[in-house]
Amino acid sequence: MGGDLPPRGSFATLTDADVARFRSILESTPGDVARAVLTDEKSLADANEDWTRAYRGRSRVLLLPRTTSQVAAIVRHCNDRNLAVVPQGGNTGLVGGGVPVHDEVVLGMKRMRSVVSIDPSAGVVVAEAGVVLDDLETALNREGMTVPLDLGAKGKCQIGGNVSTNAGGLRLLRHGSLHGSVLGVEVVLASGEVLNLLKTLRKDNTGYDLKQLFIGAEGTLGVVTKVALLAPRKPRRVDVTFAAAPSFSAAVETLVAAKTELSESLQAFEFLDRASLELVCAQMKGARDPLPGSEAPFYVVMETSGSAERAAEERARLDRFLADAKTRGRVVDGVVGADAKHAAALWNLRERISLALKHAGAVYKYDLSLPTARMYELVEVMRERVASAAAAAAAGAAGAFDFSRVSVLGYGHLGDGNLHLNISSPDGYDARLERIIEPHVYEWTASVDGSVSAEHGVGAMKPNEVSRSKPAAAIELMRAIKDVFDPKGILNPYKVLPPRARL
Ligand code: FAD
Ligand code: 2HG
Ligand code: ZN
């Protein structure tokens, strides 16, 4: 995936003197340095490899600072010495952005994990970048608040990583993107300067909104050290509905009906195809088809929020919604979670698809923004391409790649027009399979004016594809911005921006 490795830039190589300097920066409390400057095989193996296991660097040092001033001192030293650096959050990114390509210094944020303040009256939380999303959610729940973001990686990803990737997730439909929810950031620039944009105001029209540049910058413009975030009130109760649709267009009609009839209570609207459901049920312990017998080609998962007092009424409203959808042929069957445990089990069928795919072997992942009504066409096109390749291979020489074992799955955030196309290969990554998939996936996406990255970012996987979704003039401006913030290009090199020759 993502083509050949870009050549190593003309950065300095780590020396013992650099490691000694890092030790002195991070030696704030006795004994701490042993946990803050890591050069052992196990720590480096984890830091060098991404979640998908498709990207692997060969860094020789992992640094785990505790404070913004330590981050600043590390980055200043790297800039002075011309050492390249990769900021790393929970390392759950899916485009190889958080791991080194070559031997970059890994700057891990996991020890910066304090929730700095929660203001229930303003509905604002300030947290260090390394706070794990689930921990932030727990801290906010204690105050009756919630994080305006939820994703399957919540047990490991960090709020700084979420902001740096502009993660979308399961409730973007309800809360909008982080470009709206983030009120401020504190960032260490490549020079080592600390840029304090940590405002907690909802309104601040004092010229260019610089914090927006760091949301989705994937660590290429600075290291995010703190985040101020809008945190809405946590709904008193939520209902989860799982329904089977006879066709993709019926699933889309159900979305439109849900927006109309359930309006502001609608929090999430997701879809998965039958292949995804079957995979989760096969791979994940305890997962089972909640609508056995429906054998539908598509499923939707819908979350609605409501008040604790009107539970029965809201339940009845969802039952009516399902009954009406059945009468009109939009769904063939459906179920509303009976209690929190049942609701979680229904959500798991959607949230665990990525994990199930990881268990099933190698996977080619595509995260695309497409016109909602046409989202699934691409899955069908890719299935046809793989089937034709299988037929051709069967007729051809022995020893050909066995395309018949490849599965093409489609699922994603239907309410946001975001398809997750995953092509699963139990026999590993293979150039012959890759040629069937790429560049066709990206060409098709561009042909319908979609985006080659809806929410996962560009990372190391897609710099060569960015120009399919952005005009050359926009890429030149991105490059100019990069030069202002990071003139030596030490921050997360090889990521996001296409190599110059591609323009
Ligand atoms: P990392 O993976 O460590 O890093 C991601 C990028 O951000 C890298 O470029 C890194 O250099 C940079 N970065 C990290 N921290 C900082 C920092 N403090 N300062 C500057 N740069 C930094 N994504 C979605 O959008 N929606 C989903 O629904 C979703 N679901 C997922 C489900 C699963 C099971 C998995 C494994 C991943 C999922 N993802 C999803 C992808 C991933 O979780 C998100 O991109 C997440 O925001 C990454 O956070 P992280 O802390 O793991 O960052
Ligand atoms: C999701 O929505 C994530 O589940 C992951 O964005 C998607 O693994 C994927 O392709
Ligand atoms: Zn997603």
Image (spheres, rainbow, N blue to C red):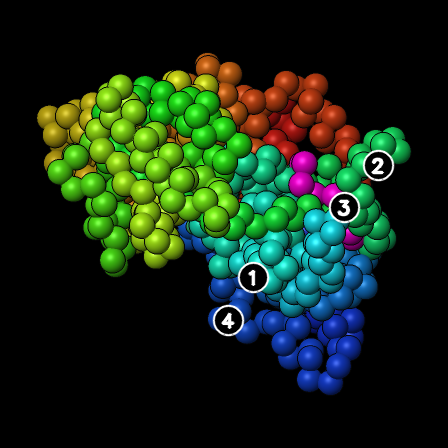
Give the CA separation, mark 3 to mark 1: 21 Å
Of 280 and 488, nearer the camera is 280
Residue denoted by label 3? 184
Circle 2 SS class: loop
Question: What span is colored magenta in the figure?
Answer: 179-190
Q: Are discs 4 and 3 less than 8 Å apart at CB?
A: no
Going from N to C along the chain, the mark reached first, 4 or 3, is: 4
Indicate the position of residue 143 as horizontal and vertical percent values.
63, 59
Q: Amino acid at mark 4?
A: Glu
Residue denoted by label 4? 41
Above or below 245: residue 351 = below
The residue positioned 12% from the left and 30% from the top of the image is: 394
Q: Residue furthest right?
A: 206
Residue denoted by label 1? 138
- In which image quadrant can residue 405 be found? top left
| Closer to viewer: mark 3 or mark 2 | 2
Question: Is 191 left, or right, of 366 in this rendering?
Answer: right
Residue neighbourhood size for the residue with mark 4, other residues' Cα within 10 Å, grouped as few (<14), some (14–19), many (≥20)? few
Residue denoted by label 2? 204
